[in-house]
Amino acid sequence: MDLVLFDLDNTLLSGDSDHSWAQFLIDTGVLDGPSYAARNDAFFEQYKAGTLDIHAFLEFQLAPLARYPRGRLDGWHAQFMQDRVLPMITPAARKLVLGHLTEGSLCAIVTATNDFVTAPIAREFGITHLVATRAQVRDGAYTGRPEGRPCFREGKLIRVDEWLAGMGRTWKDFARTHFYSDSRNDLPLLERVSHPVVVDGDDTLTAVALERHWPHISLR
């Protein structure tokens, strides 16, 4: 059996679900437009530049979840899926995932974006396993804080180790290990697998792929 890991934003999606979720809340009037949009854009640029402070970002990004009841949040998310997420899923991305699932590989989405935003997206792809930054829940409501280690940079590798251990597995159990990603931030996990694949990579990761002769594909 192979282990196949997928980054989500700008990899399986032709866009960023985290940034898009915040923009969706702005566009629907839930969040103040000018000030929130400016901070949202600034964090996104820091992510792309490889300079993001993940803790500062999560404090910003998770705060709205604590302001509203879960039912209202879920309703907004259902509309978000229809309006913003489904248009970001290409036929090529669906075909890639389906191919690995059909082969019987153990597949997971591994993403820095929080699990409130990403769990329905994983289900849309038919992927059971999601390794994501966890949004803390207490008494059925979001607290606006993360739970445990963020699934970001080296944290992705640690969280995958924990996920495998929770199933009684290790990396050695798999004949081949794959990770698909677009981002320089994912180099720790890309360097861990036996078959790294760059997908529509950023400039830094594209240069690394060329230097190391890693496959570089497009799903767009």
Image: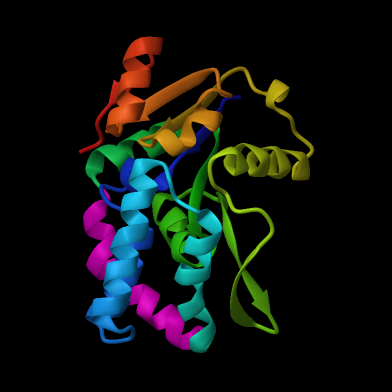
In this view of the protein, can residue 103 be seen by the observer? no
Q: Is residue 173 left or right of residue 63?
A: right
> What percent of the width, then of the height, locates residue 48?
34, 45
Query: How many labels sit on residues?
Result: 0
Q: Is residue 37 above or below residue 6?
A: below
Q: Which residue appears at 67% of the width and 40% of the height? A: 158
Please indicate, yes or no, whether residue 189 appears anywhere in the rendered image.
yes
Which x, y percent locates residue 84?
25, 64
Q: Which region of the structure is painted magenta?
A: 70-89
The residue at 27%/87% (across/down) is 29
84 up-or-down from 211: above or below: below
Q: Main secondary structure of the magenta part?
A: helix
- Residue placed at 43% from the left, 45% from the top? 51
| The N terminus - image quarter | top right
Residue 124 within the segment the image draws in magenta:
no
Left or right of 149 on screen, residue 119: left
Q: Position of residue 58 (x, y in %)?
A: 51, 64
Locate the C terminus by quadrant.
top left
Of residue 8 and residue 176, the one placed in the foreground of this image is 8
